[in-house]
Image (cartoon, rainbow, N blue to C red):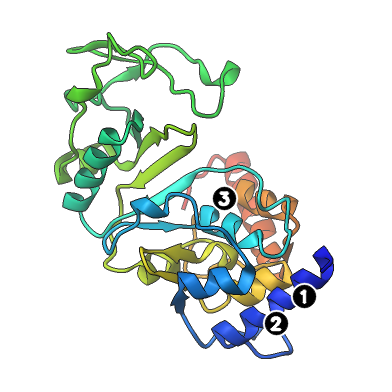
Amino acid sequence: MSVINASRHHEQVIRELVGLPQELDCKAHASKSRVPIAEARRALELPEPAYRELLAPDRWLAGGAVLRWLAGGFDYRAIRSGGDYDFFVPSLEALNRTLDELLARDFSFRCFRSLKIMCPLCGRPAEVSRRVRARASRSAVDPIRCPECGELDADDADRFPVERVLRLTPELIGEHHVLAIELLSPAGDLVHLSARPFYETPGKVIAGFDFSVVQFGLDHEFLYSGPYAWPDLLRRRLRRNPGRRNTTYSRFRKYRAMGFRPYPDTTAWFLWNAVKWRTRRLLRLPDA
């Protein structure tokens, strides 16, 4: 079977599996919000998703990594190019437990991704000691300097003992606006454990994602999807989530470069916000 014919066959099987109409337009949506991973794999003739052994009832993989996996069933090669892996959990206890488990599996701690730099050993405010990311790989982390712990470099095991890495608390997350824990897998993949906000289910996690085509998630048993995730993936369209106000133009360009054609209202929203941002800068107005 040719690549084109295989892709068409997969599209038809997916329509039946998730309950899509034969004619897809901007209003078409799936009638099922989850299907067993095994059935999705059979429908698209896919291998096991990466890191499935880490998935659990309270540990989920969601977003671009799941999109890249599914795109393998349609030969969307641009979408399948590299990226990181974002894991989500429903509680702080599950987050710290996941960190412990991944460190035990030889994942390497890189840093806490936060709006305010903090020392990963004592939790005090810290500062970047030197910039390295411009000349290094995307997994490089700038060394930081803590008044109490000195200079800490994720690549220096002697000066940065990973066994002393903090376990997060609500106070640390709130004070430093911690977004995620960043690790490197033994295979060299960048992995993020989301630290805020926590949601009870994978469905609630993906409902907050900025574009419909990344509204896919996996737990240990099911593949979850937003109502427009499948039709927009099949049609290669880009739809902004109206509930998200803070998505960036760089992400808009990223998915356009992958071959997703934005709906007119999605393009208009980004153009309007670009004009508004530039006007505020020219007039020196504070951001809304």
Query: CB atoms at circles 1 and 2 under 8 Å apart?
Result: yes
Q: Which of the two discs, 3 and 1, labels the residue nearer the N terminus?
A: 1
Q: Residues within 10 Å of mark 1 (few under 14, many from 20)?
A: some
Relative to 69, residue 281 above or below: above
Residue type (three-letter) at the residue carrying disc 3:
Thr
126 vs 63, nearest the viewer: 63
Q: Which mark is residue 130?
A: none
Observer-side mark, 3 or 2, equals 2
**Which residue is painted at 46% across and 80% down in the image?**
33
Secondary structure of the residue carrying tag 1 is: helix
The residue pinned by badge 1 equals: 8
Residue type (three-letter) at the residue carrying disc 1:
Arg
Relative to 10, residue 183 above or below: above
Residue type (three-letter) at the residue carrying disc 2:
Gln
Q: CA distance from mark 1 to mark 2?
A: 6 Å
Q: Is residue 236 left or right of residue 168?
A: right
Secondary structure of the residue carrying tag 3 is: loop
Q: Quadrant of residue 197?
A: bottom left
**Which residue is painted at 46% across and 53% down in the image?**
288
The residue pinned by badge 2 equals: 12
Q: Which of the two discs, 3 and 2, labels the residue nearer the N terminus?
A: 2
Q: Residues within 10 Å of mark 3 (few under 14, many from 20)?
A: few
The residue pinned by badge 3 equals: 248
Q: Is residue 39 left or right of residue 122?
A: right
Secondary structure of the residue carrying tag 2 is: helix
Observer-side mark, 3 or 1, equals 1
